[in-house]
Structures are given as C-alpha cells and as structure tokens.
Image (cartoon, rainbow, N blue to C red):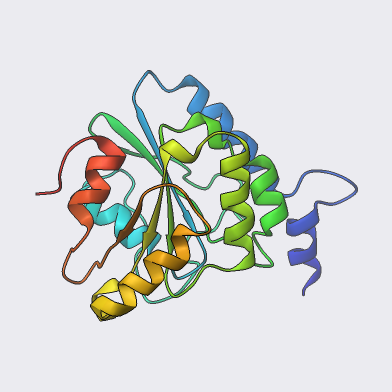
C-alpha cells in the first residue's frame, strides 16, 4: 500500500481519513434535505448496486451512478468532494461504495454510515453473504432497522428454481426481513424492489 493510500485510509497525524470525512458529510447532507424518501443501496464490491440504482430511477437520477465492468467503481476514499447523494423525483438515493475493502474498511463504514437517516436500506449481494454482510445484518437487527431493510440477491437470472429455494431457506435462517431475487438483465424482481424502496412498481 502506498503512503498516499495509507494516509487516505487512516488519516494523517490523527486527522480523519477522506472516507471518514465523506461519511460524516453524508450524515450532514441528509439532515438538511427536505422531507423526502431516502434510500440507501449497500453491499460488497461488484454486487450490482449502481446498476440497480440506474434501473430503479429509470436512468434519471442526478448525478447518474458509475455503472461498468470495473468493481468498486464508486469510491468515497479519495475525493473529499465526491457526490454522495443522487436525486430522482421525490426521492434521494445513496449508492454506497462496496465495503470490506482496503479503501472502504467495513469497521469504518459500519461505524459512521448514517443508517437511521434512511427510510429504506437495500443490501445487495451477488453470490453469497460474506462475514461483513453478516455483521451488517446483525447490526441492522440489533438497531431495530430490519423492517426497513431488504436483502437483494443480484444476478439471479442464472439460478435454477431449486437453487433459489435452497438459498431462500439458508438466508431465512440468518435474516428475518424481505428477500428478493433480482436480475438487471431481465429485470426480474425489480418491481418488488421498487415497491419496497419507493412505494411503486417499476414500469
């Protein structure tokens, strides 16, 4: 890790890192946004968070998320002026960077992310839940936020019906909230996510 990366991750001379400053700025920005629907999209790098945001908003949020093949394209660890909030109609969205990386360590992210500021939390995962996801879900349950949280299994178009059922049983033993299987390719599950997140079905 370069000297610059170490400074950005932990801060120089005890000062907050860029990530810490951005997480605190996010809380401040959300606090002054007029009463509106606030939705956070969280998950591991490469889970499909930005693509989900783009579809949920009909590619109409401002600014648009960075969608592409590169994982962890969204970063709050280097730019102190990074765009944190995306507006669309009467809702605002936060497309969070993938947690559990060197640039976005889970411990910092979970400690400072303003979970309670949101009406809905979408936790997106691709293949399986990792230890950081379990920690996040445990924290959500501990803080009474399960009713406003949906677990989204992305890239689900490749799953056979029996695989979905087995995964649903497994996840049901670890998480009590709503679970949806979603695919950006065929848009399956998108209407269910949109009803939960912003109260209307995707068109």
Expressed as whole percent of the image width and height from the top left, the position of residue 136 reads 60, 52
Above or below, 151 against 141 in this view is: below
Q: Which residue is at the front of the view, 193 or 93?
A: 193
Q: Which residue is at the front of the view, 80 or 87?
A: 87
Expressed as whole percent of the image width and height from the top left, the position of residue 80 reads 61, 46
Above or below, 136 against 101 in this view is: above
Q: Which residue is at the front of the view, 51 or 116?
A: 116
Spot the residue most to the right. 13
Q: In which quarter of the view is residue 130 placed?
A: bottom right
Which part of the image, by quadrant, shows the N terminus? Answer: bottom right
Left or right: where does residue 150 sit relative to residue 22? left
Q: In which quarter of the view is residue 183 placed?
A: bottom left
The residue shown at (49%, 51%) is 96
The residue shown at (57%, 27%) is 28
Q: In which quarter of the view is residue 134 placed?
A: bottom right
Expressed as whole percent of the image width and height from the top left, the position of residue 115 reads 55, 37
Residue 155 visible, this orientation: no
Above or below, 82 against 124 in this view is: above
Total marks placed: 0
């Amino acid at each position: 890790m370069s000297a610059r990366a170490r400074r950005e991750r932990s801060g120089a001379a005890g000062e907050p890192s860029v990530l810490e400053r951005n997480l605190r700025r996010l809380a401040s920005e959300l606090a002054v946004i007029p009463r509106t629907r606030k939705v956070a999209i969280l998950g591991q790098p490469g889970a499909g968070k930005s693509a989900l945001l783009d579809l949920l908003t009909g590619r109409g949020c401002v600014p648009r998320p960075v969608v592409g093949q590169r994982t962890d394209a969204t970063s709050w660890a280097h730019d102190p002026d990074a765009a944190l909030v995306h507006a669309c109609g009467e809702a605002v969205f936060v497309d969070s960077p993938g947690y559990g990386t060197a640039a976005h360590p889970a411990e910092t992210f979970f400690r400072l992310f303003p979970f309670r500021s949101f009406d809905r939390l979408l936790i997106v995962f691709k293949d399986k839940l990792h230890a950081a996801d379990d920690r996040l879900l445990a924290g959500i349950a501990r803080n009474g936020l399960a009713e406003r949280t949906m677990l989204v299994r992305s890239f689900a178009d490749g799953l056979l019906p029996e695989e979905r059922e087995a995964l649903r049983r497994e996840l049901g033993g670890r998480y009590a909230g709503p679970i949806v299987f979603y695919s950006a390719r065929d848009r399956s599950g998108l209407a269910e996510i949109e009803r939960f997140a912003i109260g209307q079905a995707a068109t």
